[in-house]
Image: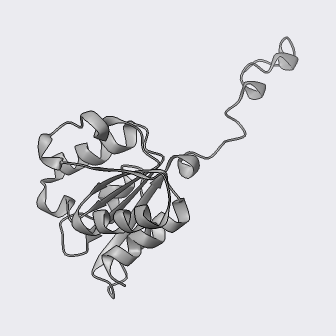
Amino acid sequence: MNTQAIFESVIRDARPSTLLVTGGAAEAAARGWQSSASDVRIHVLDTGQGELAGPGAEPHDLALVADTLESMDRTTGTQLLGQLRNLGNRQIAVLVSNTSEWRLTDLVALGFTRQAGGDGRSSHSLYTYNIDTYNHKRDWNNPKYWANPEMWDKARW
């Protein structure tokens, strides 16, 4: 499966109305989605600017990154992915060449999960970040368990 087809699958699943793209395959897939769906806005990210500004600094439904991290040093690439995540993009899909210096642990540390690739048969790996599934709700992390007032004067910790 080619890189553009991978992104087309991600776009079909996400059904975004706003896209932020960087890289040829990502832009081609986004333009294909724009031609088939109505009222879709696409912003092409210039990664040479350093810190994201303008339309790139606004939240988007989906951000696609391809052919970008391989040409960046790890610090700059980490900053780019961190900015994309922290600026409120609902979903991010990153396609990284398996021959690059980027490893699974680098992207997992930023909250991404590997969706495809990395099995030795493909040339690229797809990593995704989705704010809706990133941090699952924990039972113990709510006010019901914080103070435990029914145990006051009954037990000492």
Q: Is residue 146 above or below residue 124?
A: above
Q: Which residue is at 23% across, 62% downward?
A: 23
Residue depicted at x 34% and y 72%: 125
Among the 4 quarters of the image, the one containing residue 52: top left
Instruction: Tell me: 84 left or right of 71.
Output: right
Residue located farthest toward the bottom when viewing the structure as drawn: 121
Comparing 141 with 20, the one in front is: 20
* Residue 89: percent from left, percent from top: 43, 44
Nearer the observer, 146 or 48: 48
Q: Residue drawn at (82%, 19%), measured in percent from left and top? A: 155
Quarter where residue 104 is shown: bottom left
Q: How many numbered marks, from 0 up?
A: 0
User: Image height check: is 22 above or below 149?
Assistant: below
Q: Position of residue 94 (x, y in %)?
A: 34, 61
Quarter occupied by the C terminus: top right
Q: Is residue 18 visible?
A: yes
Query: Where residue 82 sits in the image (x, y, percent)?
Result: 32, 43
Q: Is residue 113 visible?
A: no
Residue at 38% across / 37% down in the picture? 86
Task: Tell which of 136 and 46 is nearer to you.
Answer: 46
**Front one among 121 and 24:** 24
Give coordinates of residue 25: x percent, y percent. Answer: 28, 69
Q: Which image quadrant: the N terminus?
A: bottom left
Image color mode: one colour
